Image: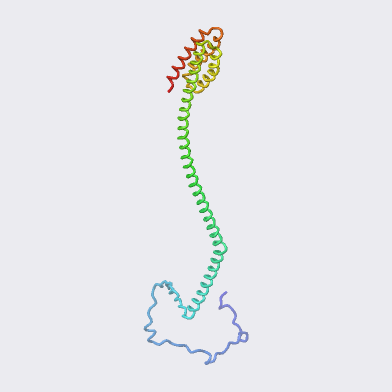
Amino acid sequence: MTVQDLPPVPEDELPPQEETTPEETPPEETPPPDSLAEAPAPPEETAIPQEETAPPPVESEPSPGKMRLFLRKALRWLIGLFIVFALGYLTAFFSLYQPLTNKYNRALDEAQKAADQVASLQAELEAANAQADALQAQIETLTTERDALQEEVDAAELHFYTLRALADVQGARLALAGEDLDTARVYLSKTPAYLETMQSLADADMQDTLDDMQQRLALVRGELDDDPDTAGTDLAILADWLRQFETALP
């Protein structure tokens, strides 16, 4: 079925058409003939549009008044921060650093005083040691002199007691020659003590000789009553030993 086969629509059923007045229809503008002639022919290929880069935004420079106001505010902040830091520094200095510094200085002073005392005591100790060394040397010198003097005294005493023993033996011989036995006993009464003293003063190499003298003296004292002649002979031997002993002394 085609459009031609459709039945015609009656006119009374058609919607009314608005009539256009000449004022309502805008006039059609006809291009001038020159523009039609000069219009270029469209290109055969459509050009690809290129994206245009936008220029960088130009920063607007702040005005001098705003800059001055900003600098004033910044300066105020800087001054405030400086005051805060200064107050903090002063507080820390007077509350922490200064007491520690004073304590450290006092400790240094005490350490210096202690070091001075130690140095003074060290000097006194060295002086005392020097005096002690000098006294020790003096004592050693005096001890040496004393020992030398003691040796001289011992030698003199040994000479003295040797001569005393020899004198007693010679006196006993004279009394025995006169047949005075009592006087001979008196002379020989102290001779044993002299010989003992001589043993305490003599050197070790003289002890055997002094022992022989003690034994010979004991024989003489036992022979006075029973055998005076033998006693006289033993006294002569003892006298010879005493003379030899005295001669050998330094």
Above or below residue 238? Residue 27 is below
| Quadrant housing the N terminus | bottom right
Of 220 and 26, nearer the camera is 220
Residue 241: x and y in percent read 46, 15
- The outermost residue toward the right is 13
- Left or right of 46 in this view: 70: right
Residue 191: x and y in percent read 53, 18
Above or below residue 111? Residue 221 is above
Residue in view at x 54 percent, y 7 percent: 227
When asked about the image quadrant of residue 247, the answer is top left
Residue 188: x and y in percent read 53, 16
| Quadrant housing the C terminus | top left
Of 225 and 162, nearer the camera is 225
Residue in view at x 49 percent, y 43 percent: 128
The total of numbered circles placed on residues is: 0
Colour scheme employed for the rendering of this structure: rainbow
Of 115 and 34, nearer the camera is 115
Residue 197: x and y in percent read 52, 22
- Left or right of 19 in this view: 145: left
Above or below residue 249? Residue 230 is above
